[in-house]
Amino acid sequence: MNELIRIEENTLIVAEKAIEQIKDFERKRKLIDAKEKEFKEQLLKVMEENNIKTYESPDKSLQITYVPESLSTAFDSKAFRDYDIETYQKFIKDVNRKASVRLTIRGE
């Protein structure tokens, strides 16, 4: 593999440098997510106040579309399961999920 992630005696070894990189990625992701959220909130406010529905950058590389609040209908499968378990059982199916890695950073 490489020097940051390896297997020794059937045990995963992750170098301190890799651990710090993962933590740094997560900190940066959170900061970027917060900045994006703030930016979108500002855009929403300005677009609503000025009745602007779309914006396209001069080079056409970016389009911003105002999506108004709406009402949608959702199916409450938990309530249906509790209400009629036999019918619920007839309609459930197993779904394969792709393998993945979950990173949990504690103490930050």
Image (cartoon, grey):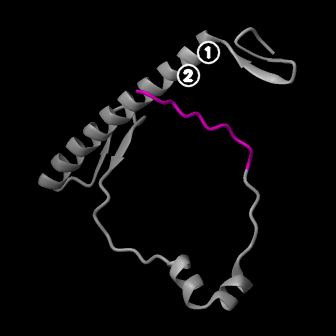
The 10 Å Cα crowd at callout 1, few under 14, some 14 to 19, many 20 or more, is few
At which x and y percent is residue 97? 73, 53
In the picture as drawn, the residue positioned furthest to the right comes out as: 9
* Secondary element type, mark 1: helix
| 33 vs 67: above or below | above
Name the dominant secondary structure of the magenta segment.
Answer: loop
User: Number of numbered discs present?
Assistant: 2
The one of 41 and 82 positioned closer to us in this rendering: 82
Q: Is residue 72 left or right of residue 93?
A: left
| 6 vs 64: above or below | above
Q: CA distance from mark 2 to mark 1?
A: 6 Å
Q: Which residue is mark 2?
A: 22
- At a point 55% along the width and 90% down the height, the residue shown is 83
- At a point 16% along the width and 46% down the height, the residue shown is 46
Q: Which residue is mark 1?
A: 18
Quadrant assignment, res 35: top left
Q: Which residues are magenta?
A: 98-108
Quadrant where the C terminus is found in the figure? top left
* Membership of 66 in magenta stretch: no
Residue type at mark 1?
A: Ala
Q: Is residue 93 left or right of residue 106?
A: right
The 10 Å Cα crowd at callout 2, few under 14, some 14 to 19, many 20 or more, is some
Quadrant where the N terminus is found in the figure? top right
Q: Is residue 98 left or right of residue 49?
A: right
* Secondary element type, mark 2: helix
